[in-house]
Amino acid sequence: MKEPDAIKLFIGQIPRNLDEKDLKPIFEQFGKIYELTVIKDKFTGMHKGCAFLTYCARESALKAQSALHEQKTLPGMNRPIQVKPADSESRGEDRKLFVGMLGKQQTDEDVRRMFEPFGNIDECTVLRGPDGTSKGCAFVKFQTHTEAQAAINALHGSRTLPGASSSLVVKFADTEKERGLRRMQQVANQLGMFSPIALQFGAYSAYTQALMQQQAALVAAHSAYLNPMATMAAVQMQQMATINPNGIIATPITPINPITSSSGTSTPPTLAATPVSAIPATLGVNGYSAVPTQSTVQPSSEAIYTNGLHPYPAQSPVAQLDPLQQAYAGMQHYTAAYPAAYGLVSPAFTQAPAILPQQPPQQQQQREGPEGCNIFIYHLPQEFTDSEILQMFLPFGNVISAKVFVDRATNQSKCFGFVSFDNPGSAQAAIQAMNGFQIGMKRLKVQLKRPKDANRPY
DNA sequence: TAATATT
């Protein structure tokens, strides 16, 4: 039925409203079709705008490719149709390079000329924004991995192009997994997850997933008041939080209802016990965040919370604001950076901190929440301080106290501590997400704090 | 400085 040397073709730039039966006539003119499949999302069934096509005859595939590839643009598409052998037909992504630190002037042809001494180039594209301006980087695909490696050896760091801020970058392009990680990290940064915790845990830890899911839930729950983009962004985050491209099996996350923990109108948002240190966001050349060392973490009297905003004093005029603003006041620990970044929130919200009296961080004594609101954390890393566990547990609700126990004599952490929330749901959420969570060689033990009289029989 | 998609 199909020749043994038949070629499977990848078809790109297909309008999403065309299905197999619409596509068949376009391709049939080059020969008998053995198989034609529109690529759909595994879970949603959504048309992904591309397809696989196998002709019975190898010759038909070659004819179709030369007649159609980049030759015409289907209705509704901005770019011409793609017809080329599928990745599965050769080797995967080990021959594709990312080229960074190009000048804005360089064209596809300029880049091609730079790379062609090292081998045969299959594709060469400068990345451009919607307005056509170069993003200062490109993808170059060689026919073999060896050629690609030769280009890296010769060109990476070899010169600084006019208009570029640093020397030329030539490296293998991200794999699909790495792309997912990078996207995740960008969202994480937009969300204000600058804490050393998030960085240490990496973008796909159970912690991050728990955090992202809560972010998504929070935004989704309030998006009805805002604009439809918020809902879309929330859905996107939810999807990202669900993906686990590393294949790491994270601690299962029980669905959490952060709304009850953060927007209870009867409970004013409460100041956390300890100011969070200002954490410099250190970025490596590859765009991945680096873990700041302890010495780079400067304590700051102007306490900077993870989201860059200040907490509302418990007795602030926030009570006079409308219910929506109150809800936001309760949410600020999670979402302030997010809506600000996207312009989703009304000026009333974004300006709220400015019109409220600022109070210096209080020397608040350790407070315990009601029964069921206090958790015990054991097997903390030695270097974790109040600030770290505060940041670690902020995502689960309003933290009213976070304390690592230290040895009186040495000032060293005893590797356990307590965190108190203002409601039991937050405490349960924290336990669910963080108990058993691996840090380094150890696993956190996170459980409800025993009532003071628990082991007293009478 | 990172993307139109590859069952």
Image (tube, coloured by chain):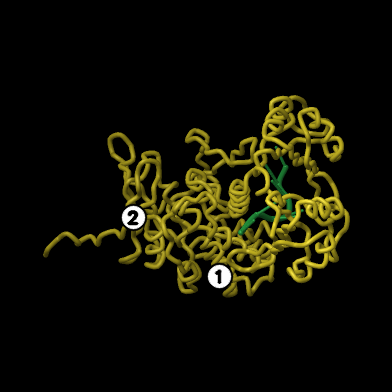
Chain colours: A yellow, B green
Residue picked out by circle 1? A326
A71 sits left or right of A17 in the view: right
Residue sitting at x 30%, y 66%: A371
Real-space Cα separation, disc 1 to disc 2, in angstroms = 30 Å
Residue sitting at x 54%, y 42%: A279
Q: Secondary structure at mark 2?
A: strand
Residue picked out by circle 2? A446
A121 sits left or right of A379 in the view: right
Q: Amino acid at mark 2?
A: Val
User: Crowdedness of circle 2 by 10 Å Cα count: few (<14), some, many (20+)?
Assistant: many
Residue sitting at x 86%, y 35%: A110
- Position of residue A208 relative to residue A155, above or below, is below
**Label 2 marks which chain's residue?**
A
Rendering coords of residue A418 (x, y %): 34, 53
A97 or A416: which is nearer to us?
A97
Q: Amino acid at mark 1?
A: Gln
A7 or A292: which is nearer to us?
A7
Q: Earlier in the sequence, mark 1 or mark 2?
A: 1
Task: Tell me the quarter of the picture where residue A326 sits.
Answer: bottom right
Q: Identify the image quadrant of the C terminus of chain A.
A: bottom left
A39 sits left or right of A249 in the view: right
